[in-house]
Image (cartoon, helix red, strand yellow):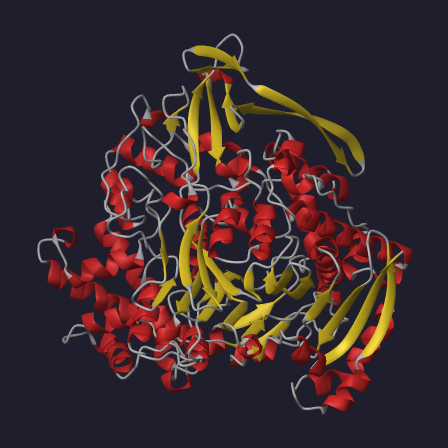
Amino acid sequence: MLIQRRAFLMATAAALALPGSLGWAQKTAQARSSRIRLTGLRAPIDIVEDELGVPHVRAGSLHDAYFGQGYLVARDRLFQIDIDHRRDMGRMAEAFGAAFVAADKAARLFHYRGDIDAEFATLPPGVLECAQGYVAGVNARIAELEADPAQMPLEYGILGLRPMRWDVRDLVRARGIGMGDADDEVRRAQMQAKGVLEVDQLMAPLRPAWSYRVPEGLDCAAVSEADLGVLLPSARPVPFEAIEEAALDPAERRADRFAQGSNAWTIAASRSATGRPILANDPHLGIGGFSPRHMVHLTAPGLDVIGGGAPGLPGIMQGHTDRFAFGRTNFHIDQTDLFILRTAQEDPDLYWHQGQWKRFETYEDEILVKDGPPQRVTQRYAQGRPIVAQDPARQRASAFATVSMLPGGNMRFAIIAINLAKDWTSLRQAFRIHTSPTNFHYADIDGNTGWQTIGYTPVRPRHDGLFPAPGDGAFDWTGILPVEDMPHVYNPKEGWFASANQMNIPADYPYDKKIISFSWSDPFRYNRISEVLNAQPRHSIADSIALQHDVQSLPARALLALLPDALSPEAAKAAGLLRRWDCGIEADSAAALLYEMVMPELLAGFRDLVVPAAARAFIPSVNLFEMLAILAKPDGRMGADPVAARDALIDRALAAGWRKAQADAGADPAAWRWGDLHRVKITHPLSSLPGIAAAFPPIEGGRSGGDSYTPMARGFNARRGYQVSHGASYLLVADVGAWDNSRFLLLPGQSADPRSPRYRDFYPRWLAGEMQPLWFSRQAVERHAAGRILLTPG
């Protein structure tokens, strides 16, 4: 059936590439149907795939609607979700050998060891049924492939693998391993021990302003990276997607973490050209490997939702229901702490807590190993917190406290609960099981708009989370902030609000009693979004699309304002080109290319000038916002004559950037184009393997404007080249209530199979910023139908 369907789609791909180019009768005739019998389905479901590749699932129950989503994501992205699931479950070694045992042990250390049935019992009504349906859909596709291996994704034959079956209990069990801000805590302790802590503000400024408080009893001189143990990527070397992260130095890891974020804004009807609310969202995630979103429309009694879902996660992350639109950006919550434990000399499995010796909770795991014997590993926990490092000789261990390991931290179910909500009130109930830190944007068909910060926020009565803390119990968390106590607004009088990962805690929020975070992204994207929205008394759908593709650079404006009048000859050439520039990071701009060469030179020179030698090992890079603020008002940190030192610094950066531009882009500035260097290339994460590289040719050739700090975020890491590494691969603009007017983009396409016409069909549209219609009403979907699948119980 799938082969026939692909043949049909390939035959009509050229026509379908132009929405609306065929008459309704022609398209209806071409909308071929297929019928597939699948085990696990409760009743027949109808799937209509529109001419843009978005499937519309029509089911008679919640279970079957999410069955359809699971089946479709496994149809389009099986290897992607399978390898992620295998990694999360700590089952890489059984497929790839002994080199993965350490990674599997680390992954299993972050498995939930509590009562899974009790976790299920706390879920809102209907959520478990949906999750069970999703898992059944994934497994049904796997069974279909096992019965017809010719349809199997190419990776399995090349690697000699078989996909893993899914179990809904694993959605509770796997909680995910992550550093959080533990590396920042360790760095601050080390800097405190060296007497250079204040310099850390140049790299990691505290927002809002805060005085450091070292927890009583913490020996900062004893803290080292060894306390991070398995949290360090280098401690668990894994090929595939993690190998690049493992090779990064700490500065690059931190830069990558803060570079990724999102934009979202919500416009009230009073400020909208449509007379209805508008909600726009473009999540900034990795670009270059597997697409992090998959499109689907799910319909069943009590459910009607469309948008982008995260492959392997049930539900829609960003999109709209028939009642409201919803979007999300990263909010910043300090959700982790590193606790330093004292262990007993005579028995290292005993640790001191609340005035007595307690024994680590231990669990034995067996890791199967390809071409080798199984390996038994012991996992240790203290108060449910994974022990990530242990040094019996020093009577020392590290326990990593993370909200994801708490009872109820079932993030994989929270998105379903949001999809099932009907209004703002029921949404706030769904937020109670939402662990991940998020700015949630909302706009409904009644004209209401809302912003709610969600995510588990630990209550720390005796410390602020900026340093490791003694693990004797004095600094333990005492709960989680209720959703009602988190910052939020409903129908704000300004008529709009936006979030772009900036520090957005209201000024009157009682921060001293409810600490959330001190680490936030720089406000450049938000400030530009705010500038545009404030200037538009009536904001349209087209305005939102334009703003999502805006490449105006506020850091570039700041630099141009600082250019000295008197410059060396080489620097004067660079300054002349920049002064004629409008500060747009356009793909065809020579000045944008020069700017991107100058700024790293300026950052490096500023670091060398202002960071004391004793602190340089801890400060490999400086914060751009902090640097520009200091350059605008130079002080004694820049020497006896700060203004002269600043001007000399800028002169050197301009000259060095000019030379760098000539080396990378050619001797003739008239031929420089930022997009010639800043390209969008998408490759398989395993393309280092010849067989994979041959089967999955790269999707490449596209030039891009933008950078990490423009609203159209097209980030890159200068140490690794200029290729786009993160940005908005999925974009949504929702016309609330007139849903068929909504627009979207998805890079590079729905399918990860190069044999599919949906493999790269959106790549040119995404590069051109040509947003596509997101059809929602039954009439629009039928009018644009390109194929139909009837799934029936087997």
Quadrant where the C terminus sits is bottom right
701, 271: nearer the viewer: 271
Counting the numbered discs, the total is: 0
> Splitting the image into 4 quarters, where does residue 122 fall?
top right
Q: Quadrant of residue 511?
A: top left
Query: Looking at the rendering, in which quadrant would you find the N terminus?
Result: bottom right
Q: Residue 49: percent from the left, percent from the top?
A: 73, 73
Residue 285 picture location, percent across and down: 52, 60
Where is 315 relative to 362, above or below?
A: below
Determine whether 586 is above or below 377 in the image: below
Examine the rendering and report whether any part of residue 656 can be seen: no
Residue 403, how many percent across, how many down?
49, 37
Viewer-closest of 678 and 145 = 145
Residue 580 is situated, as x and y percent measured from the top left of the image, at: 27, 84
Position of residue 686 relative to residue 367, above or below, is below
User: Is 390 situated left or right of 35 in this image?
Assistant: left
Q: Is residue 605 above or below residue 515?
A: below
Instruction: Name the residue rendered at 68%, 35% in the picture.
Output: 101
Taking depth in this image into account, of 533 and 394 the one nearest to the observer is 533
Is residue 333 visible to the viewer in this orientation of the structure?
yes
What residue is at 36 percent from the left and 21 percent from the top?
474
Q: Is residue 487 left or right of residue 675?
A: left
Q: Outermost residue toward the top?
A: 346
Q: Nearer the viewer, residue 523 or 495?
A: 495
